[in-house]
Image: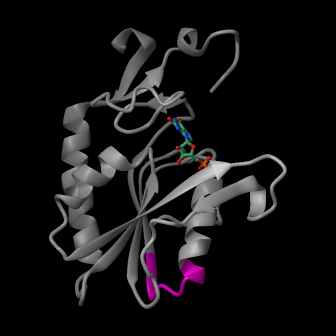
Amino acid sequence: MDGDIERILISEKTLERRLATLADEISKAFPRPGDGIMIVTVLSGSIIFLADLIRRLPMKMRIGMVSVSSYRGRTTVPREIVLDTASLPELHGRDVLIVDDILDTGGTLRVVQGEVSRAGARSVKTVVLLRKPDKAPADVIVDFVGFDIEDVFVVGYGLDYNEFYRNLPYVGVLSPKTYGNGSTP
Ligand code: XMP
């Protein structure tokens, strides 16, 4: 599997160190969590980031999940992104932290943030592990960013290509020979 990776972009050690400081930043931003915060995580790319992050957060929390799919020709939400909120607890009046893997074009987060606001959350903050600053749109605001990265397709640490590579312990750049035929992921 490592042979499919062109280079390691963020090593396991670097991830570990940044997770500690990121958790510190987030903890300070929720000084009085009251009856706890509500995590809303976006499946499936965020699962490893989520597991490592929440074990470093000291406050009481509940965890809800959403999944996102893109459907051509469906018009339920803008830009053909459809949100499955079946595993999402009541958000009304809650302090919510959205946890996502990557802010790329921003379509996913725009829909998730909109849904959380519409559900009546008292406050909404967002953390992403990765952001591609060259592509991230100005209207999608994130409060905490693990790493700004160049515009390359990355896998590992939860991120996939065709559902593979999520279990790599680092973030790596997928080798073009892996997806082949001149097509990009
Ligand atoms: P955007 O911000 O474009 O991103 O709505 C939506 C989802 O697309 C996936 N994504 C990636 N997955 N490597 C991946 O493995 C990447 O470089 C990449 N860019 C986007 C990811 O699941 C994100 O939540």
Residue 153 position in % (x across, y down): 54, 30
**Residue at 57% across, 65% down:** 112
The answer to whether residue 122 is magenta is: yes
Camera-nearest residue between 150 and 110: 110
**Residue at 47% across, 56% down:** 42
In the displayed structure, 101 sits above or below 7; it is: below
Which quadrant is the C terminus positioned in? top right
**Residue at 66% across, 23% down:** 184
Instruction: State which quadrant residue 59 falls in.
Output: bottom left
Camera-nearest residue between 41 and 71: 71
Camera-nearest residue between 179 and 86: 86
* Highlighted range, magenta: 117-124
In the displayed structure, 169 sits above or below 31; it is: above
Instruction: State which quadrant residue 155 falls in.
Output: top left
64 relative to 174 in the view: left or right: left
In the displayed structure, 50 sits above or below 153; it is: below
Residue 62 position in % (x across, y down): 29, 73
One can see residue 137 in this view: no
Outermost residue, right direction?
73
Colour scheme of this structure image? one colour
**Residue at 19% across, 65% down:** 57
Instruction: State which quadrant residue 23 falls in.
Output: bottom left
137 relative to 132 in the view: left or right: right
87 relative to 15 in the view: left or right: right
Which quadrant is the N terminus positioned in? top left
Q: Quadrant of ligand 1?
A: top right
